[in-house]
């Protein structure tokens, strides 16, 4: 039976950025597919509806309005058909498990050791800024071919792009309520192009094994390369989503383990449990929370709601990972819960290409951290605050240990 569309016009961007959980719990309970005016789209908040929309032939990918303003076209997350196939054929090969297994340890472990050596004798640290984010951005930066870009600059870029991408508030006319919110992202893109353009000039005539060089050359006729303006939107996607995801997953996993000290001790003593701890951390606080959208290509009914052709549905994978129909006490971090597939990496043919890479960056980062500092304790004099509705993670994590 078709139901009336719920319009939830009392939801604010501030609520979503600071603490989206009560909003999405309300959505799952009252209107699991509802129109949210401040986002200018429908929102899917349960695992069942997110999977249905992500895999349905009646929908295709579309980038959110703020995402399109931030990344431009064609960004891999917002295109379909031949263009999507080509962009995935460009980015996927380097991220296939057999390829990642070949170099992941040699890439990430020295990076993790280098950052740990900077503070492991100090007895205290702020792990988001000093370890989780730097390891994440350095690993991907080196893979892309950006070895000469500092980790601080890479972190600055992804934070600026993130704030731009999630500057999604719109008024009743569909206009952005804070157009100035894109200024930081524009500044970051200008800097990125100033640094990467000369590298592309070099890679066009001197290809190497860096990912961006492969993006230019792979699958192209002899003597031809992909146009840089074709590549840049997907590079911006990587410099935001792929840069932040492993770092924030690492940090969220640590925060979760600090809420269950018995499980923290278990993981430190049994490093083989780290992948399971990371999986629960990504379910508990999904790094990519609500950044993926689809548009209906025909009139379609979903969850009893009739959607006309052209309806945009934002899939909240973070909410889906707190679905009470799948998880007992989903707001709790619990390593002992039965392992179930989660949606932190999306679903369908637009599922994240970097699943394997991201998981192994997190795994190696935590292995090295626990091996070097097995007696970590959270500094309870500082609260842990999370931020973001599109991308979400702790803004800081202060820890201490006995040297």
Image (spheres, helix red, strand yellow):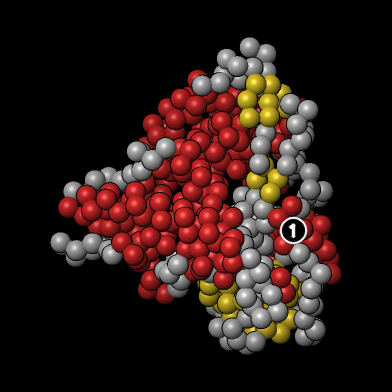
**Is residue 270 visible to us here?**
no
- Whether residue 329 is situated above or below residue 266 in the rendered picture: below
User: In the rendered view, does 170 fall on the left or right side of 60?
Assistant: right
Q: Which residue is mark 1?
A: 14
Q: Is residue 234 visible?
A: yes
Q: Element under label 1? A: helix
Please tell me whether residue 181 is drawn above or below residue 142 in the rendered image.
Answer: below
Residue 266, compared with residue 76, is above or below; it is above
Residue depicted at x 55% and y 31%: 131
Res. 108 image quadrant: top left
Q: Residue at x 36, y 43 (%)?
A: 146
The N terminus lies in quadrant: bottom right
Viewer-proximal residue among 46 and 20 = 20
Residue displayed at 51% across by 32% down: 364
Residue lying at the far top of the rendered structure: 403
Residue 6 placement: quadrant: bottom right
Image coordinates for residue 101, horizontal then vertical, percent: 40, 39
| Residue 185 rendering spot, x and y as whole percentages | 51, 57
Q: Point out residue 169 in the picture as x, y percentages from the top left corner.
A: 67, 67
Query: Which one is in front, 23 or 125?
Result: 125
Image coords of residue 228 (percent x, y): 31, 61
């Amino acid at each position: 039976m078709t139901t009336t569309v719920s319009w939830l016009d009392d939801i604010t961007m501030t609520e979503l950025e600071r603490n989206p959980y009560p909003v999405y719990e309300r959505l799952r309970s009252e209107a699991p597919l509802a129109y949210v005016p401040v986002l200018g789209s429908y929102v899917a908040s349960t695992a069942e509806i997110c999977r249905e929309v992500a895999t349905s032939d009646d929908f295709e990918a579309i980038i959110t309005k703020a995402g399109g303003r931030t990344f431009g076209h064609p960004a891999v997350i917002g295109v379909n058909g031949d263009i999507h196939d080509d962009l995935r054929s460009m980015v996927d090969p380097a991220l296939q498990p057999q390829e990642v297994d070949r170099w992941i340890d040699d890439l990430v472990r020295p990076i993790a050791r280098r950052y740990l050596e900077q503070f492991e004798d100090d007895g205290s640290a702020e792990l988001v800024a000093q370890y989780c984010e730097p390891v994440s951005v350095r690993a991907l930066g080196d893979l892309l071919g950006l070895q000469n870009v500092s980790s601080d600059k890479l972190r600055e870029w992804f934070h600026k792009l993130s704030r731009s991408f999630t500057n999604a508030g719109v008024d009743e006319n569909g206009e952005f309520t804070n157009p100035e919110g894109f200024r930081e992202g524009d500044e970051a893109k200008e800097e990125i192009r100033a640094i990467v353009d000369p590298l592309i000039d070099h890679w066009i005539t001197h290809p190497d094994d860096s990912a961006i060089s492969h993006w230019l050359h792979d699958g192209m006729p002899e003597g031809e390369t992909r146009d840089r303006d074709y590549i840049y939107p997907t590079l911006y996607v990587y410099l935001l989503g792929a840069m932040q995801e492993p770092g924030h997953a690492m940090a969220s996993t640590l925060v979760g383990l600090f809420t269950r000290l018995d499980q923290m001790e278990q993981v430190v003593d049994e490093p083989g449990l780290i992948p399971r701890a990371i999986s629960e951390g990504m379910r508990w606080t999904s790094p990519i929370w609500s950044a993926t959208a689809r548009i209906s290509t025909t009139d379609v009914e979903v969850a009893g709601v009739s959607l006309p052709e052209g309806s945009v549905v934002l899939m909240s994978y973070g909410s889906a990972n707190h679905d009470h129909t799948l998880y007992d006490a989903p707001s709790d971090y619990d390593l002992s819960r039965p392992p179930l597939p989660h949606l932190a990496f999306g679903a369908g043919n637009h599922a994240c290409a970097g699943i394997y890479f991201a998981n192994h960056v997190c795994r190696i980062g935590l292995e090295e951290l626990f091996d070097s500092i097995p007696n970590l304790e959270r500094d309870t004099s500082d609260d842990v605050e999370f931020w973001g509705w599109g991308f979400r993670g702790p803004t800081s994590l202060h820890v201490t240990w006995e040297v």
